Image: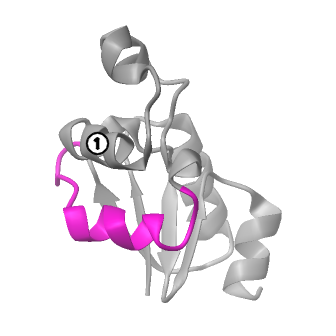
Amino acid sequence: MLTMYGIRNCDTCRKAQKWLDANSIGYRFHDVRADGLEESDLLRWAGKVEWQKLLNTRSTTWRGIPESMRSDVDETRALKLMLQHPTLVKRPVLEKGKKVIVGFSAQEYATAISI
C-alpha cells in the first residue's frame, strides 16, 4: 500500500491524488498538519532522498522563520525545523516500500508504481 504524506489543501497533493485515483491506485493519505509528523518518518525519508529535496524553502512557513534560523541551514537544523513545522516538508511525499518520491511528477509516479 502506498502512503502519501501532505496536507489536504495543497494543490500539488490534490493533483497527485487525482492521478492516483485516475489510475485506480490505492493509497493512504496522511495529513502532516492534522496527523502530525513522526521523527522516524522524516529520518527514513532523509535516508532515501537528500534533505535539501525534502525542505520546502518556497513555502510561506519558511519565509516566516527568522532569517537567523534559515541562514546556513544544515541537515540537522533542517530536520529539526521540519519536525517543528511539518508544512516545511515539500509535498507530497509518496512512500512505496523502500521508494520515496518528493513532489509530484506523473512520469515518476508511473515508473515507481510500475503502471
Label 1 Cα neighbours within 10 Å, binned few <14 / some 14-19 / many ≥20: many
Please state if 22 lies on the left or on the right of 102 as rendered: right
Q: Residue at x 44, y 20 (%)?
A: 71
Q: Residue at x 51, y 87 (%)?
A: 98
Please state if 21 lies on the left or on the right of 32 as rendered: right
The amino acid type, in three-letter code, at marker 1 is: Pro
Q: Residue at x 53, y 73 (%)?
A: 48
Asked if residue 83 is among those painted magenta in the image, a careful observer would answer no
Label 1 residue SS: helix
In this picture, is 87 found above or below 52? above
Query: Which quadrant holds residue 49?
Result: bottom right
Residue 15 lies, in percent from the top left, at: 62, 48
Q: Nearer the viewer, residue 8 or 76?
A: 76
Q: Is residue 48 visible?
A: yes
Residue 8 lies, in percent from the top left, at: 36, 43
Query: Which quadrant holds residue 24?
Result: bottom right
- Where is mark 1, residue-wise? 86
Judged from this view, the residue extending furthest toward the right is 107
User: What are the residue bounds of the magenta stretch?
Assistant: 33-50
* Quadrant (top left/top right/bottom left/bottom right) for the N terminus: bottom left
